[in-house]
Amino acid sequence: MSQSSSDVTPIEPGDYAQCREAIRQGSKTFFAASMVLPGAVREPAYGLYAFCRLSDDAVDLDGGSPQAVERLRERLDRVCQGRPLPVAADRAMADLMRRYAISRAVPEALLEGLAWDTQDRRYETIEDLFDYAARVAGTVGVMMTLLMGVRSPDALARACDLGVAMQLTNIARDVGEDARNGRLYLPRVWMREAGLDPDAFIANPVMSEELKSVIVRLLASADGLYARARSGVAYLPLACRPAILAAGLIYAEIGRALEALSYDSVSHRAHVPTFRKVQLLTKAMAATPWLSRGTVSEPLSCVAFLIEAVKQTPAPVVAKTVPHPRPFVNVESHFIRVLDIFERLERAEQMSKSR
């Protein structure tokens, strides 16, 4: 980040608006939840999420080739040099890294995790899986925390807990879909302990009581991390807390939706209905004033390098802070907007089901 301002490609008018539109089209739930964030964080979050989503999609759409990852590394090189490609998400990411002093090591770790997806990597233990989740999801938690103007190691540790928990939930939800694509993220040691042959399962993914026990075990690990992450929300600016708390509650609810399906994520894909998301968002907003930091827990060992990278990167010269409003100032107006978006999503879901 040592470039002079004259060497840096500036953000262009409309770049963040393009990122916002990409998220509105590609991740309706994230888009709706983001409306609870204060404007000072919402716009940067669109840029960050658009870059991360672009990276993930670039690997998937290319069939998971190493070449796709290498092209992403080249794009990140240009972003870090302040000379991004003429793409809105890349220019936005370059702007964010400069303004919020995001260490290059953090998005590099994200790309490393995406590279693992192209390498037929095997996850023998839950610790191996944590290493993967730290890269593809813990990194996003770290960067989101920096966008909120928070650099505390304790806050970053809890953000990583939340990211890793969300990734474990994703894995539990997508067991069948991943297997049909030749991928397996469940800890192989756990599968063998349950009496399952991991390779035979990939060849013929079938739901069983043995598989159910592994999925239940994985969701229990996620739930433990969601509980740890909750205390970290209290480190964030007050205006940011409802959205982050709601994100954790909604993702954890996927586990409850799986339970209702007898944990069958081979032939079903669990989802949280829109009305339930609204309930959880309401719960998050009501709980926000009562959050406390609680007992400080050591960070997961797999995320220590991310926290250290932030510590080694000087904070922005002009600190980016989020206004700290009195409790619930403007919350009602935000909530009404989010309800409107969720209602439209509900109608869209109903229309798609009726076709």
Image (tube, grey):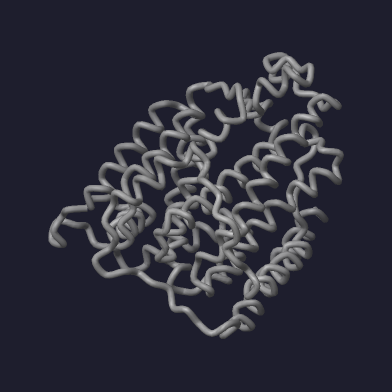
* Residue 185 drawn at (x, y percent): 62, 29
* Residue 110 drawn at (x, y percent): 43, 40
Give the camera-side residue of 308 and 74: 308
**Figure check: 132 above or below 107:** above
Give the camera-side residue of 196 and 73: 196
Kindly give the residue lying farthest to the front in the view shown: 295
* Residue 303 drawn at (x, y percent): 47, 41
Residue 122 falls in image quadrant: top right
Q: Is residue 331 left or right of residue 52?
A: right
**Figure check: 279 above or below 104:** below
Residue 151 falls in image quadrant: bottom left
* Residue 228 drawn at (x, y percent): 62, 52
x 35%, y 69%: residue:
320
Q: Is residue 149 left or right of residue 75?
A: right
x 73%, y 64%: residue:
280
x 80%, y 34%: residue:
267
Give the camera-side residue of 76 and 291: 291
**Figure check: 70 above or below 26:** above
x 48%, y 63%: residue:
20
Numbered marks: total: 0
